[in-house]
Amino acid sequence: MGDNDLGAFLRARREAVAPADVGLPGGPRRRTPGLRRAELAMVAGISVEYLTRLEQGRDRRPSPEIIGALADALGLAAEERVHLYRLTKVGGGFTCQAAAPPDRTVRPTVRALLDRLEPAPALVANALGELTAFTAGFERLAGPLGLLDGRPPSLTRFVFTDDRARAAFPDWDRIADERAADLRAAASLGDTRAATLADELSVVAGPRFSARYASPAALPGRTGVERWSHPRVGEVALAYETLDLSGPAEQRLTVYLPADGAAESALDLLAAERVG
């Protein structure tokens, strides 16, 4: 990394954005390409003085909210948002570098329990929303939606960073509220990995995550009914129960059951198919 990669990246992206891209007039007499500092500051809702400090390397630790506002104003793609976030953490501020990786080990007895739950969709997840184990029934349900594409699969990341999530969950807003509340609860108990993920999602997902994360109104979801939209069987209403598993890994077991006759028929149809 160079001496001021954060400032250089912000300046380069600012100069690559045309005024018309953010609804501003271009004008014939512009000495610099792209946006002026004052224009970017106005669109992002920050002061020109603060943006100048960032670009000049005199402030290298902007908050996730500031990073998210700049990323929105610059129209950054998801990978550019992640890069911007990581540039602010160079030099020891990236908290997940100092934290131990999450324990993704699942006890043999828990795996045996999952086997007994077949063909019901069931999963084990940690406090970050990472899926550490799941039944074949859950794979048949979630795989075609793209939820299992991550390494490791993460329900939290899928909900907030994958465009397919809104189609997968007709009640996306409620599910997003619960995912953010889950992460906030973990971070409030001192889980530095959860706090780091929250910082990253504040940048990558922007207000659709950060506003929910900051709100104390939503509570983590432990039981209820979710609607899933599956390409093979259509919309399915699933009742779920979530149970805390004993042990230091802070894992939870969630089991999905049909909420009505149509859902029961849909799950039976999926159970009759082999996982590809």
Image (tube, rainbow, N blue to C red):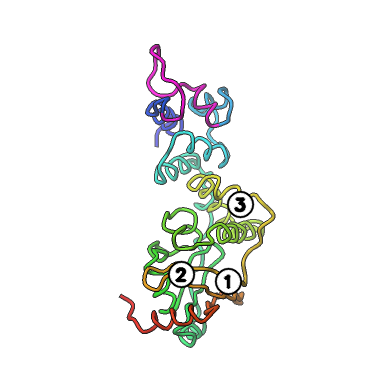
User: Where are the magenta residues, as a range?
Assistant: 21-44
Q: Residue at x 42, y 25 (%)?
A: 19
Q: Secondary structure at mark 1?
A: strand
Q: Secondary structure at mark 3?
A: helix
Going from N to C along the chain, the mark reached first, 2 or 1, is: 1
**Residue at the extreme left of the image, as rendered:** 276
Going from N to C along the chain, the mark reached first, 3 or 2, is: 3
Proximity of marks 2 and 1: CB atoms separated by less than 8 Å: no
Proximity of marks 3 and 1: CB atoms separated by less than 8 Å: no
Residue type beneath disc 2: Glu
Q: Nearer the viewer, mark 3 or mark 2?
A: 2
Quadrant location of the C terminus in the rendered image: bottom left
Q: Left or right of 11: which side holds 52? A: right
Q: Determine the CA span between mark 3 and mark 2.
A: 26 Å
**Residue at the extreme right of the image, as rendered:** 217
Q: Determine the CA span between mark 2 and mark 1.
A: 13 Å
Q: Residue at x 42, y 28 (%)?
A: 14
Pointer 2 residue: 235
Q: Left or right of 111: which side holds 211? A: right
**Is residue 79 found inside the magenta-colored segment of the image?**
no
Q: Position of residue 120 (x, y in %)?
A: 47, 82
Number of numbered discs visible in the structure rendering:
3
Residue type beneath disc 3: Arg
Q: Quadrant of residue 149?
A: bottom left
**Is residue 32 found inside the magenta-colored segment of the image?**
yes
* For residue 4, above or below residue 204: above
